[in-house]
């Protein structure tokens, strides 16, 4: 499985995506970058929900515990001020986006497609496929987080000490990915059918996650969606409590 995973990451070359290349070379305009990050919030907030669904499907408590610990980390280990939603909101605020502005923006279909795929696979697909899909997303996000965080600082948009969210994921998501890989690795050598399902999940996870960045980059200047307004629903993965 490890050999397959390394070959997959070399083939898809996540850091060579147009999103990250443009961010690194300075051609990604700040306004457009922030716009895509407003959308990425929906993915950040939604991500633990399919994971919790998958945890409920796992047959053994030790398997469920591994995923539930991951879900707990997503929620700041019980301190919601340190949840991934909160740290990402802090990042957006420091980039100049208020909560009111975030709530005004309608969710783009590119993000909804990603979130819906996660939920569908975690709720209905083969368990090894779902585990592998989440694992490779966490794996890829570690390197992507490092690149995005470094680029934000290099562009002068924030100082290193102002950066939140991405430095955490650069480290934490490697640990999370290993948690998924430890669950599926024994299956690959024991059962050809499970090996196939794992490979399917790795390919799918890499595809939908990198496709999300590609789609956000292509849609970054689509003005019509900037004029559509919320307030959002819980299905979007983000909704401000109403006063």
Image (cartoon, grey):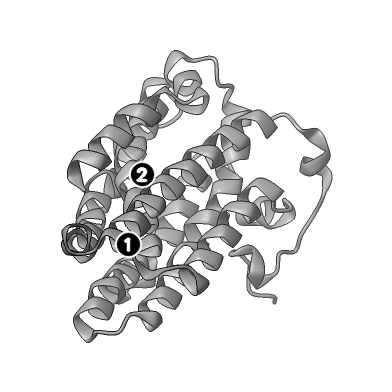
Task: Determine the residue positioned at 63% across, 53% down.
Answer: 113
Q: Is mark 2 on a helix, strand or loop?
A: helix
Whole-percent x, y for residue 97 in the image: 59, 45
Residue 37 vs 154, above or below: the answer is: below
Q: Nearer the viewer, residue 164 or 14?
A: 14
> Which of label 1 and label 2 is nearer to you?
1
Image quarter of residue 193: bottom left
Q: Quadrant of residue 141?
A: top left
Residue 210 x/y as whole percent: 48, 38
- In x, y percent, where is residue 164? 36, 46
- Count residues near mark 2 (Cα–Cα under 10 Å), then give few for <14, some for 14-19, many for 20+: many
Q: Which mark is residue 141?
A: 2
The residue located at (43%, 49%) in the rendering is 205
Q: Position of residue 134 (x, y in %)?
A: 37, 57
Q: Please report the residue visible at 76 percent of the width from the left and 33 percent of the height from the top.
A: 222
Sequence-earlier tag: 1 or 2: 2
111, 11: nearer the viewer: 11
Tally of marks: 2
Which one is nearer the viewer's eye here, 168 or 222?
222
Label 1, label 2: how many angstroms apart (C-alpha)? 28 Å
Q: Mark 1 points at which residue?
A: 193
Instruction: Tell me if 133 is positioned left or right of 67 in this view.
Output: right
Instruction: Residue 130: give its label.
Output: none
The outermost residue toward the front is: 192
Residue 24 located left or right of residue 96: left
Above or below, 16 against 206 in this view is above
Secondary structure at numbered mark 1:
helix
Where 102 sits versus 60, above or below?
A: above
Residue at coordinates 29% horizontally, 72% vertically from top-left?
Answer: 67
């Amino acid at each position: 499985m490890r050999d397959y995973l390394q070959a997959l990451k070399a083939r898809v070359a996540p850091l060579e995506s147009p999103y990250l290349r443009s961010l690194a070379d300075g051609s990604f305009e700040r306004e457009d970058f922030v716009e895509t990050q407003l959308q990425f919030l929906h993915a950040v907030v939604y991500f633990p929900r399919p994971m919790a669904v998958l945890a409920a499907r796992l047959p053994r408590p030790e398997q469920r515990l591994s995923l539930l610990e991951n879900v707990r980390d997503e929620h700041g280990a019980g301190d919601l001020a340190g949840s991934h939603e909160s740290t990402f909101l802090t990042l957006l605020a420091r980039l100049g986006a208020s909560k009111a502005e975030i709530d005004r923006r309608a969710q783009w279909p590119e993000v909804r497609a990603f979130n819906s795929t996660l939920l569908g696979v975690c709720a209905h697909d083969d368990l090894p496929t779902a585990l592998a899909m989440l694992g490779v997303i966490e794996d890829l996000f570690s390197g992507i987080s490092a690149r995005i965080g470094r680029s934000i600082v290099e562009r002068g948009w924030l100082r290193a000490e102002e950066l939140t969210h991405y430095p955490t994921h650069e480290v934490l998501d490697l640990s999370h990915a290993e948690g998924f890989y430890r669950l599926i690795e024994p299956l690959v050598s024991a059962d050809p059918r499970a090996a196939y399902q794992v490979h399917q999940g790795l390919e799918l996870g890499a595809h939908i996650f990198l496709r999300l960045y590609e789609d956000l980059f292509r849609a970054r200047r689509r003005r019509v969606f900037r004029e559509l307004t919320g307030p959002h629903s819980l299905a979007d993965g983000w909704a401000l409590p109403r006063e």
